[in-house]
Amino acid sequence: MVSDHILAVAAIDGVSAEAVGLHAGEGETSEMLALHPHLVHTDRAVAGYCGSMAGLMPRLRSGGLRAVTPIGTLGDAGDAAAARGKRYLAIQTEVFRQALAQEAAAEREPVS
């Protein structure tokens, strides 16, 4: 699922969780626009499945992506933006950095 950190960034810009999506939606497309804009064809952006992401994983596991969306997209990349993609990447990087720092600190703690 999409992290609460990403959804918080999206909400600031008025982007819904359904638009952010799980695959090729606003979230991933914004990140790609930030990283490799020459690979993104915004003129081809079409909304895929934009329903509730809650409970979607069992359907994906049992029937695959095409069972949920015929175009293979979970979300709506129509409002994707490089600037927001940079913010998504920055918050994800910070969350990963904190998790790694906590793990490293736990490994240094003496076992009693």
Image (cartoon, helix red, strand yellow):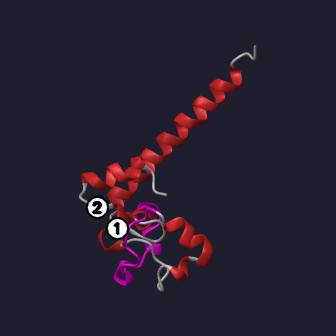
Specify the amino acid type for callout 1: Ala
Task: State the residue at coordinates (32%, 55%).
Answer: 10
Q: Crowding near pointer 2: few (<14 within 10 Å), some, many (20+)?
A: some
The x, y position of residue 89, in whole percent, is: 45, 52
Q: Establish if 64 lies above or below 108.
A: below
Q: 69 left or right of 78?
A: right
Q: Crowding near pointer 1: few (<14 within 10 Å), some, many (20+)?
A: many
Rendered-image quadrant of the C terminus: top right
Q: Quadrant of residue 96?
A: top right
- Nearest the camera: 28 or 73? 73
Q: Establish if 92 lies above or below 19.
A: above
Q: Give SS at disc 1.
A: helix
What residue does disc 2 label? 15
Q: What residue range appears in magenta? A: 30-54
- Nearest the camera: 70 or 89? 70
What residue does disc 1 label? 19
- Nearest the camera: 48 or 44? 48
Specify the amino acid type for callout 2: Val
Q: Quadrant of residue 108?
A: top right
The x, y position of residue 46, in whole percent, is: 36, 81
* Residue 29 sits inside the magenta stretch: no
Q: Give SS at disc 2.
A: loop
Do labels 2 and 1 touch, CB within 8 Å?
A: yes
